[in-house]
Structures are given as C-alpha cells and as structure tokens.
C-alpha cells in the first residue's frame, strides 16, 4: 500500500497540469496560475487524504475559486495602483506596458470576476476541457443541471463582455 | 409537446447525438427550438473564444519541489483540528481504538464468539474521571490498522457534505433565536479499522504506566475486532472567527452543533464475549460501579452506551423524533445536548442553549 506522501505525489503529477490550466483560464497569467495551483495542492494536502475519491473534483473547483478570488483582488489592486500612479502625476506609468495589456483579455477576466461564483466556475471548468460529468462533480450538482448552468453562464458572459462592442 | 429545455439544447451544442426519441422528433420540426439552438451555439462559440488561452507549459517536477518545501499554511479557522491533521492520525487512531473497545465492553461482544455490535437504542452509564483515564488507555493494548482510512474533512457546503458522506445532511429549521446562520460543514466517509489484541504490547504499556494487568486470556491475544465507523456529517453554527481573523489563537465557541453518523458496527474474530468483557472490566482503574452498570445493560449488542461523567453532567431520557433519546445538561443555557438513534443512524444536537431549545431543534430536524 502506498503512503500518503506517495499518493499525494501521484495525485500531484496526474492533476497539476490540469489544475494550473484551470487557474490560467481565469488569470491568463502562467506564473500566477502556477502559484494558485500550488496553493490549491498545499491546501488539499493539509485537509484531505490524497486517496479521497473526490480529490480531482475538489482540486478543480478550488483552482477555479482561488483564481477567481485572486482576479477580484487583482482588480482592486490595479485600481489602487492606478489611483496611486495618477496621484503621482502618472509619470511612473509605462505607456508601452499599458499597451501590452490586451484590452479584450482584461475585459473578459473582469467580466468573469464580476459574475456569481457558480456560473463563472462552470464556464472556466468547461472551457478547461472538463466533461459535463467532471464539472458536475466539481460543483456538487447533478449532471443534468450542467447544460442549463452552462447556457446561462455563457449568455451572461457574452452580455458582460460585449455590452457596447460588436461581438 | 413543450419546447426543449435550455439545458437539453445546450448539451446538443456539445453532443450532436444527445437528442433521442421524442426530443429528437420535436427538434426536427420545431423552428423555435432550432432558432434557440442557433443562439445558444453562437453564445457558446463566443464564450469559448473569449476564454481561450495559449497552452500552458508547466514543469511538474519543479512545481512539486516547491509544494514540498512550502511552509505550512495557516489553518483555516486559526486552529488546527486534530482529526484532520495527518500527523495526528496515529493519535486519533489510538483514541478510536479506545472507543472501539468501550463499544465492545458495551456490547458484551454479543452472546457468542462472533458477536456483532450494531446499536439500535441508547443508554447512559455513569463514569468517573478515573474510569475515563483507564478506558483511554485501552487503545494501547493492541494495534489498530485502518483498512479504509479515516478521512474527516471540512467541506464548503451541505451538498458537498452529502457527497462525501453519502448521508442526507440534516436541516435545522427554524434556527433558534440568536444562533448565527453561518455554518461550517465537516464530513467523513465510512472508515474500517481492525484492532488486534497484543498481550505483550498491553503488558509493556501498562508497565510503563506503573500498572500490572490481569493476564490476557490466550484466546484473546492475537484476536481481532473489526470496527466500522461513519459515514458522518457535522454542522457547526456560529461565526467561529468573528473578531479574531488576525489572531490564530482565538476562536469563538460554536453556538450549535448538529451531528449525524451511521451507527458503529463492531465484529469480533474469535475471542469469546465473556473473555473480552471480563478482561476489559478487570483493568486497573475501572470502578466496580462502572463494571456493574455495563453488565446490567439489557441487550448489549443493540445498545449504544453514552458515558456520563458523574461529577460533571446529568442526563434524562427524552422523546426525540419519536424515539427515546438522552438529554444532557439543563435549562440554564450554559450548555445542553441530546443524542438519539433512529433507523441505524446516531444523531446529536448540542449547543450553548437551554435543553428545551436543543430538544426543540432535534425534534424539528429535517
């Protein structure tokens, strides 16, 4: 029988790429996504057995939630930093850096962060390649609800992002 | 026929063959559903496009090393609950072994060698502090191995608690006045442990504690008990971290706790009922009063014993959900609890409330 440490390593190797991918789907920032994924695994290892049958579902949901929370924090931080820079005469802001930030990508991530947790999570998990069954397990809902949740979430995302645009 | 649901049409976007029978026939002739489908498919395409990200390249080996060397995270509630800390599992295992043995005393190991303990009713036995200390040492008289690990854990919702435990999570309605609606859920799947009596180990443990044990009967040394516990769920009401988010040493007491667990099941391999009961009740520190009380239990294989510290608590029999339960505490509001067993499930409600309120909560659990 494998020790818990061995089981955790096996779980980590099997799921890390996918968990980081879910976080990256929200954050669109590989480094930050990996930070989130590692925090998720550390939290999991602290609270649960690596052989728990729900391990993957827990990791997927936690990755989405933690990334969405970080996105909300990032919005607050960016607003704060922007205000501080403006107070300082905006001379420290690098215009080139500002241009490098994709406006569309930023709008999408901000829209995700504004959405309620469940529809945002459904979108992120499904876009990350999880099956209906996997999304249902991660959310703790019946598989029959996923189609409806997904449909409403997609409509909400499009409305959030495209209001005032041609999409 | 009614139009197809949102979910049905959305699923078709991902699986063109998902419609069958009447749904497929309806869709083939319904222009409204076809139009809705086109809208849904377009929204799905746009969402997928919006959420597209470049492939993520990760170095799993480096990432695993970082996780291994990461400092321990701060516990969620500012305290570490011992039952969920991996390093505490052996300690918890010892406690569980002691509990199993206490259960076993209560069973009298039924009436024969292969006795089964699966309680359907509940009663109390008075215990002294010395009794409790002696009983707590019983876990050192052998080796406990979990064949299905104990996996108690915090979960984020009643739905997740139900998923983890497989139990219907009790609903408190109405919530007593003054009790916070903030709920923390914990859940545990079923766990199975095998306790093997070991005369040598028992003697060594007793010797280290300065005690001499009665000789373990030859039929008992090496015999095993299989203990099945859980699944279980616990709901804790109260804002546990209110006002202490920055101080990990402070935690508010819960206002109300509701627990539910399948009744434990204990089976014995080949030691006789009488051997084990006589041996356990002859342990140094077990008072004659406790031994007499346990022996006086009517049907030990079907009765769950609740030890009541005689100097610290009182108990009464109450009617809960149509069965007899045991109520502890009083109506001062300092603290009260009620425990009952129904249809193979043990329930408990406790809180810093009056006994009347606690029993009221228990009777209205759904």
Image (spheres, rainbow, N blue to C red):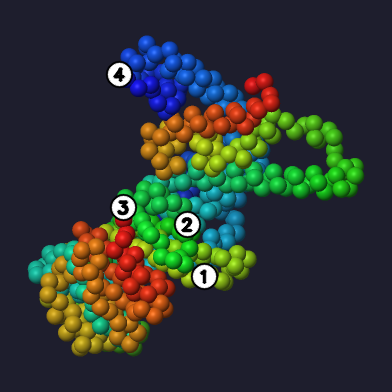
> Disc 1 is attached to a residue of which chain?
B
Q: Secondary structure at mark 3?
A: loop
**According to the image, label 1 marks what residue?**
B252
Q: Position of residue B8 (x, y in %)?
A: 40, 25
CA–CA distance in space, label 4 to label 1: 57 Å
CA–CA distance in space, label 2 to label 4: 47 Å
Which numbered disc, 3 or 1, marks the residue that appears first in the sequence?
3
- Mark in the foreground, 4 or 3: 4
Q: Neighbour class for label 2 at 10 Å: few (<14), some, many (≥20)?
A: many
Taking the view exactly as shown, the residue that stands out farthest to the left is B112
**According to the image, label 4 marks what residue?**
B22
**According to the image, label 3 marks what residue?**
B167
Q: Neighbour class for label 1 at 10 Å: few (<14), some, many (≥20)?
A: few
Q: Position of residue A111 (x, y in %)?
A: 63, 36
Nearer the observer, A54 or B2: B2
Q: Residue at x 51, y 65 (%)?
A: B240
Q: Position of residue A42 (x, y in %)?
A: 54, 53
Which numbered disc, 4 or 1, marks the residue that appears first in the sequence?
4
Discs 3 and 2 share one subunit: no
Q: Residue at x 48, y 48 (%)?
A: A9
Do tag 4 and tag 1 residues touch (Cβ < 8 Å)? Answer: no
- Mark in the foreground, 2 or 4: 4
């Amino acid at each position: 029988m494998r020790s818990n440490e061995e089981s955790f390593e096996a779980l980590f190797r099997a799921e890390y790429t996918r968990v980081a991918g879910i976080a990256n789907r929200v954050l669109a920032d590989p480094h930050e996504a990996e930070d989130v994924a590692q925090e998720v695994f550390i939290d999991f290892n602290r609270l649960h057995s690596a052989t728990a049958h729900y391990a993957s579902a827990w990791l997927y949901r936690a990755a989405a939630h933690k990334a969405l929370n970080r996105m909300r924090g990032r919005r607050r931080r960016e607003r704060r930093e922007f205000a501080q820079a403006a107070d300082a005469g905006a001379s420290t802001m690098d215009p080139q850096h500002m241009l490098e930030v994709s406006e569309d990508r930023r709008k999408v991530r901000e829209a995700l962060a504004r959405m309620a947790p469940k529809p945002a999570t459904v979108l992120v998990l499904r876009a990350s390649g999880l099956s209906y069954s996997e999304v249902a397990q991660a959310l703790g809902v019946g598989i029959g609800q996923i189609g409806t949740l997904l449909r409403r979430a997609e409509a909400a995302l499009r409305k959030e992002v495209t209001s005032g645009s041609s999409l | 026929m009614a139009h197809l649901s949102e979910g049905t049409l959305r699923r078709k976007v991902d699986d063109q063959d998902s419609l069958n029978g009447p749904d497929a026939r309806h869709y083939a002739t319904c222009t409204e559903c076809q139009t809705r489908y086109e809208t849904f498919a377009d929204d799905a395409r746009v969402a997928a496009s919006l959420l597209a990200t470049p492939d993520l390249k990760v170095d799993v080996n480096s990432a695993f090393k970082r996780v291994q060397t990461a400092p321990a995270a701060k516990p969620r509630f500012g305290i570490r609950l011992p039952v969920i800390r991996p390093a505490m599992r052996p300690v918890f295992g010892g406690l569980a072994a002691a509990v199993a043995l206490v259960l076993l005393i209560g069973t009298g190991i039924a009436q024969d060698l292969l006795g089964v303990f699966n309680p359907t009713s509940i009663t109390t036995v008075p215990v002294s502090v010395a009794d409790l200390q002696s009983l707590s040492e019983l876990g050192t008289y052998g080796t406990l191995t979990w064949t299905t690990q104990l996996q108690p854990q915090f979960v984020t919702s009643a739905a997740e608690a139900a998923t983890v435990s497989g139990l219907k999570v009790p609903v408190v309605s109405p919530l007593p006045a003054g009790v916070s609606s903030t709920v923390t859920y914990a859940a545990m799947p079923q766990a199975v442990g095998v306790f093997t009596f070991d005369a040598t180990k028992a003697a060594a443990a007793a010797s280290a504690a300065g005690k001499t044990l009665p000789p373990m009967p030859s039929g008992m040394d090496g015999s095993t008990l299989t203990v099945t516990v859980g699944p279980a769920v616990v709901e804790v009401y109260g804002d546990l971290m209110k006002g202490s988010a920055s101080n990990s040493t402070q935690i508010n007491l819960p206002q109300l706790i509701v627990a539910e667990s399948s009744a434990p099941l204990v089976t014995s391999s080949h030691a006789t009922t009488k051997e084990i009961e006589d041996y356990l009740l002859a342990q140094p520190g077990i008072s004659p009063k406790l031994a007499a009380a346990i022996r006086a239990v009517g049907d030990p294989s079907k009765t769950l014993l609740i030890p009541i510290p005689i100097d610290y608590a009182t108990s009464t029999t109450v009617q809960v959900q149509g069965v007899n339960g045991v109520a502890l505490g009083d109506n001062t509001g300092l603290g009260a609890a009620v425990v009952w067993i129904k249809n193979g499930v043990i329930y408990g409600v406790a809180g810093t409330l009056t006994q009347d309120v606690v029993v009221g909560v228990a009777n209205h659990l759904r």
